[in-house]
Image: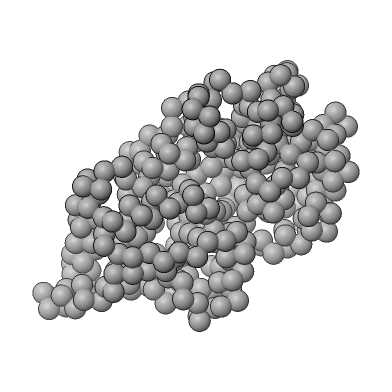
Amino acid sequence: MSTSRMRPLLASALGGLLALGATGCGLDEDAQAEAAAGSDEKITVYSGRSESLVTPVLEDFEEASGIAVEVRYGDTAQMAAQLQEEGNRSPADVFLAQDAGALGSVAAQGLFAKLPDEVLDKVPAAYRDEGGEWVGVSGRVRTMVYNVDQVPEADLPESVFELTEPEWKGKVGIAPTNGSFQAFITAMRVEDGDERTEDFLAGLKANDAQIREGNAPIVADVNAGRLAAGLVNHYYVYELAKEKGTTVDALKAKNHFFPNGDIGSLVNVSGVGVLDRADDDPDVRAFVDYLLGTEAQTYFAEQTYEYPLVEGVDTAPGLPSLSSLNAPDIDLNDLDDLATTVEMIKDSGLV
């Protein structure tokens, strides 16, 4: 990613922000200068996304904009809980979350500012908060990764609920402490109810589901034949191929997208919310604009193999388009009850 190409883009974005404020609010030149002076050229980001994944984006933003980014990393659920505990005392300006559920839980506490319409309108309505308090940055699909030598295509399940049946005993890897798994379980609660979700979790426990710390170890174990299958996000297969210097087609691990709108093929988003204390900070606005700009969206598509959410940026080669997937019709705004989901997973004995 070329810094020389990004620097004028960021300068344009910052300039456009000030010009927009002048046009919309009738500011004169003195007021524009005062707004520019409001920039202290630093922001604090709480990130529920892994450091290795987002560091290149943050560093490119820093170099291109001259705005320093202080980052606190942690599990998405942990960072959401920390924000809720800190409340208005939080030093955070921005929450960059792994999933919509965590964003929704923070928004439900009234901690986010409403984003401007010109920011929200960059992303389809299905991938942003209906109240305008967070917006999706990149998309991912839940899949079942499977080893082609151990699971014949004819035996691929049509529903994620089938993984609690005897033929899958001891064969399925899950990461119950991972934010994406927790968001998936929250979506199951919304779609199928708490009772069926509790039965599913109990079924995984009884069926000797194999516990891993994250999605990447699951995919690595499936590819190596140590697991027959696992529940992950779609892009981890692509990351493993990149790590091994090969192609997705050459791997033993393949993605299975559950058909017929099954909850196992949930489409979720990583996203960003701006803390109320930073509502008028031009540096924060520049950061959000950058995440939804061509450079960052291309990075997520080409380097992390996620789905770009802004029009005009292509998905990675070989990925099915979002529109072609028969994904469940879930309102991501409903995935905000993360605390109950975490307790439900704990009660199941999976953690």
Q: Is residue 321 left or right of residue 39?
A: right
Q: Residue furthest front?
A: 244
Location of residue 212 (image quadrant): top right
Q: Residue furthest bottom?
A: 89
The quadrant of the image that shows the C terminus is: bottom right
Total residue callouts: 0
User: Looking at the image, which is closer to me, 137 or 217?
Assistant: 217
Location of residue 43 (image quadrant): bottom left
The percent coordinates of residue 106 (x first, y second) are: 56, 68
Q: Is residue 254 left or right of residue 294?
A: right
The percent coordinates of residue 134 (x first, y second) are: 47, 61
Q: Is residue 317 left or right of residue 188?
A: left
Location of residue 116 (image quadrant): bottom left
Residue 238 visible in this rendered orientation of the protein = no
Task: Give the residue displayed 38% in from the left and 51% down from the top.
Answer: 57
Task: Give the residue displayed 62% in from the left and 69% down from the top.
Answer: 81
The quadrant of the image that shows the N terminus is: top left
User: Looking at the image, which is closer to me, 24 or 335?
Assistant: 335
The percent coordinates of residue 26 (x first, y second) are: 17, 73
Identify whether 243 is placed above or below 279.
above
Task: Give the residue displayed 50% in from the left and 44% down from the top.
Answer: 139
The percent coordinates of residue 266 (x first, y second) are: 61, 42
Identify whether 2 is placed above or below 334.
above
Identify whether 186 is placed above or below 66.
above
Q: Residue furthest left?
A: 29
Residue 54 visible in this rendered orientation of the protein = yes
